[in-house]
């Protein structure tokens, strides 16, 4: 029942927003009473926290597996992380949108818990890029922190527009992002852009 409540809530929060969805809406969607809801969750806020935790902890677990693969270099690990986030659109699009859009509705205690996990994901990517710079896989002098924000921003935004059933496959999109990160978009790489 707890999983049923969460699945119904994810659909409702995604389609009409967290603030606009009531507990009554949730229980009506699955045909149970409010008592059933309160048996598993103290509040709608606790439910939102669980949706966030479920999503970010799943990403962290997959990220750990990718980064722990000693047979892969930094470029391959970066591609795998980008592909992992993009490919989860097919199965977790609604959760991802809630994670990225509804975090502002979490209370301060829950926000801090989620923020720490988001930061962990970001810092692990940054560390992997720094290692790639040290090993010569990426060019020297890069700002790994800024690059990480750019990579994650571009990749995470895909949840708002990418259609896995569309003309572009997940692999192709991940490849385009990798090519952009590694080679840029200019015909000639002549150093930093200056006006």
Image: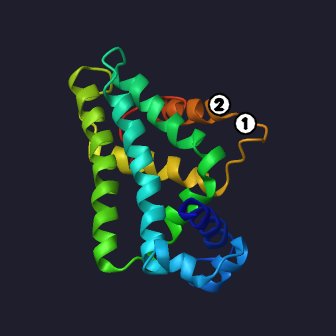
Q: Which residue is mark 2?
A: 172
Answer with left or right where residue 174 lies relative to residue 90. left
> What kind of element bears circle 1?
loop
Neighbourhood count class around disc 1 (C-alpha, 10 Å): few under 14, some 14–19, many 20 upward: few
Task: Depth check: give the residue in front, 139 or 91.
Answer: 91
Residue at x-position 45% and y-position 81%: 43
The percent position of residue 180, horizontal first and vertical second, equals 52, 35
In the image, residue 141 above or below residue 113: above
Q: Is residue 103 visible?
A: no
Answer with left or right where residue 187 lies relative to residue 132. right
Task: Depth check: give the residue in front, 130 or 186.
Answer: 130
Q: Residue furthest left?
A: 134
Q: How is the image coloured?
A: rainbow
The percent position of residue 165, horizontal first and vertical second, equals 77, 41
Residue 144 lies in quadrant = top left
Q: Is residue 167 visible?
A: yes
> What kind of element bears circle 2?
helix
Q: Which mark is residue 168?
A: 1
Check whether the beta carbons of the residues at disc 2 and disc 1 lie within 8 A of each other: yes
The percent position of residue 178, horizontal first and vertical second, equals 50, 32
The percent position of residue 24, horizontal first and vertical second, equals 64, 85
The Cα–Cα distance between marks 2 and 1, rounded to whole angstroms, is 6 Å
Answer with left or right where residue 186 lies relative to residue 166. left
């Amino acid at each position: 029942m707890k999983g049923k409540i969460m699945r119904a809530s994810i659909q409702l929060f995604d389609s009409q927003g967290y603030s606009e969805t009531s507990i009554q809406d949730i229980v009506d969607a699955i045909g149970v009473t409010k008592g059933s809801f309160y048996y598993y969750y103290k509040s709608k806020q606790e439910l939102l926290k669980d949706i966030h935790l479920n999503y970010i902890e799943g990403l962290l677990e997959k990220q750990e597996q990718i980064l722990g693969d000693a047979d892969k270099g930094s470029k391959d690990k970066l591609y795998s992380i980008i592909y992992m986030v993009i490919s989860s659109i097919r199965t977790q699009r609604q959760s991802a949108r809630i994670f990225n859009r509804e975090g502002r509705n979490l209370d301060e205690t829950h926000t801090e818990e989620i923020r720490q996990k988001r930061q962990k994901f970001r810092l692990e990517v940054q560390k992997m890029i720094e290692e790639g710079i040290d090993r010569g896989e990426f060019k020297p002098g890069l700002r790994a922190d800024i690059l990480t924000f750019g990579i994650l921003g571009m990749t995470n935004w895909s949840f708002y527009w990418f259609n896995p059933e569309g003309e572009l496959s997940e692999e192709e999109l991940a490849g385009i992002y990798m090519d952009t990160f590694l080679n840029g978009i200019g015909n000639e790489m002549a150093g930093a852009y200056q006006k």
